[in-house]
Image (spheres, helix red, strand yellow):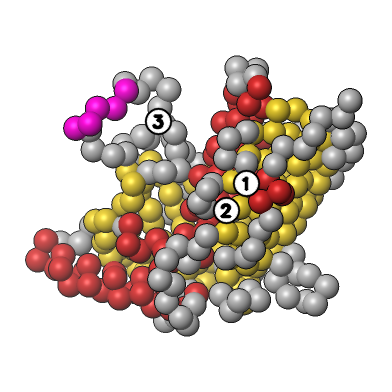
Amino acid sequence: MMISRRQAFALALALLSALPMATPVADDDASKGQRDALALLEKAARYQSRERWERPPRSLHGSFFGTIRTPDATGSVAVERWYTRDPERIVTRHTESVTGSRHTIGHDGETAWFRNDATGEVVIYSDDTERFGVDIDLLEEQRRLTRMLMDSVVLDALLPRLERIRLGRRGVHLDIEGNGHAVRYVSAEAIDDLYPPAADAPPPTPDDPPPMLLLVLALDDETGKLWSLSVQPRGRGAVAPLELHFDYHERTPSGLLVPANVRVFAGNNTAEAIRLGVSFDDDDQLDFDLDVTVDPAVFSPPAKES
């Protein structure tokens, strides 16, 4: 089953299925299994960055290109994104080959907006939340997914938030070229800041435990390289898991080792919904980095043309 173009964009830009869940460890071996899992996660973090990140990254900028499959067509998309964590702001520029669409979508922390870059038309989503509710929801999903993307490429920032870490089974991960790599699965839980509550869920009470995510990481046995990440809300089987596969790791200008290609799988589909590559700039450097300086004006809603 293919996903809609609208869903594909939401999944693509954040850049976060059916990885087998990690096999529970026997009680007698739980402590050792957790220590081994933590040691493997530490190896994975050091694979990404030789220096330890003492805090989560504050901002992101990246340029991407890729292929998106929809029920009607297959086409290419070029995307440029800016994001800051606190205050949380996002802006994404799209160019799509299937429709020829060129548009920019953003949120400055207060106002959600859209601009047709071909015509100059500006729509302020926040002015009519009922009419543009779906668009606002997709923008919120992009913000949540971008937070997860930042954490997946900087495991130092994700590790302190993980709970119930378990060492799972061994397996073989196939990379984008079909080569097999020995991996060990590690499962963990984290407070869910990725998915909104179910529409029919009762309002939470102060005594309710926070909603949790189940994460499964496929880590290279030898190097610790993160080959894939699967994410699903705990206890919500109706929400399909989302799985990212990471390939062609390259160093950013700041020295962080990140995937230059990401394949996105939704639900139990074995065919990728999206394949995204990170672009290179004119100096042949990866056009992706974290903790970059971002002009706050880039997030501001454009003025409507009179």
Eye-nearest disc, 3 or 1: 1
Specify the amino acid type for callout 2.
Thr
- Which residue is at a point 90% across and 34% down the rendered structure image? 119
User: Is residue 96 or residue 154 the one in the foreground?
Assistant: 154
Q: Circle 2 sits on which residue?
A: 84
Amino acid type at mark 1: Ile
- Quadrant in the picture for residue 262: bottom right
Q: Nearer the viewer, residue 36 or 79?
A: 79
Left or right? Give the position of 230 relative to 75.
left
Front-lying residue, 214 or 268: 214
Q: Main secondary structure of the magenta part?
A: loop
Would residue 23 be visible to someone looking at this image?
no
**Residue drawn at the location 29% of the way across and 69% of the way down:** 37
Q: Which residues are magenta?
A: 203-207
Indicate whether 23 appears above or below 269: below
Q: Amino acid at mark 3?
A: Pro
Mark number, residue 197:
3
Please provide percent x and percent y for residue 202.
Answer: 31, 21
Give the residue pinned by disc 1: 90
Dot placed on the residue nearer the N-terminal end, 3 or 1: 1
Label 1: few (<14), some (14–19) or many (≥20) C-alpha neighbours in 10 Å: many
Distance between the alpha carbons at the discs numbered 3 and 1: 22 Å
- Looking at the image, is mark 2 or mark 3 nearer the viewer? 2
State the CA–CA distance, disc 2 to disc 3: 24 Å
